[in-house]
Amino acid sequence: MGVRVIAQDRDGFVVEAPVALNYNHLKTGFGGSINAVATLAGYGLLWLELRDNANCHVVVKESSIRFLRPVRETIRAFCERPAEIEIAAFKKKFSGTGKAALKLKVRVKEDDAIAAEFDGTFVAIKTANESSAR
């Protein structure tokens, strides 16, 4: 797919992939690839938020995507970081119960125009520490 991380900061997480590796019969971005890149943007943002918790899995519980226009050159997906209050509530629940869900929004843009809108619910689940399980 040729996916690569473009940016990560306080605003969000951005990944992209070239249409040249992810095209359909019309030589525009393949819908499945657009969806996959958008999903990876959300996953990446949450994974970075949890980087201090090595013993967890992140999974997609639910997602939807709306395709608004063709992508012709680069599938660039931006996952906006939720408000600090949402992140704090997510982390508090995760710390307390070992499981928490977070809704994330991802926008796929090309030439400053939104090509797709992705909404997903991602879940983090604590796993047993392998060294303590022995």
Image: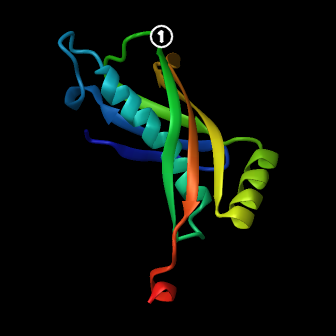
What is the quadrant of the N terminus in the image? top left
| Residue found at the far left of this picture | 25
Q: Nearer the viewer, residue 11 or 30?
A: 30
Q: Which of 5 and 127 is in front in this view?
A: 127
Q: What element carries label 1?
A: loop
Quarter where residue 33 is shown: top left
- In the displayed structure, 118 sits above or below 71; it is below
- In the displayed structure, 79 sits above or below 52; it is above
- Residue that appears at 57% across and 55% down: 124
Residue 5 image point, x, y percent: 42, 47
Can you identify the residue that label 1 sits on? 68
The answer to whether residue 74 of the structure is visible from this angle is yes
Q: Is 42 positioned to the left or the right of 35 in the image?
A: right
Coloration of the structure image: rainbow
Q: Nearer the viewer, residue 36 or 133?
A: 133
- Residue that appears at 64% across and 47% down: 101
- In the displayed structure, 110 sits above or below 83; it is above
Mark 1 crowd level (few <14, some 14–19, many ≥20, 10 Å Cα): few
- Residue that appears at 78% across and 48% down: 84
Residue 112 image point, x, y percent: 52, 19
What is the quadrant of the C terminus in the image? bottom left
- Residue that appears at 61% across and 50% down: 9
Quarter where residue 23 is shown: top left
- In the displayed structure, 17 sits above or below 53; it is above
Q: Which of 38 and 11 is in front in this view?
A: 38
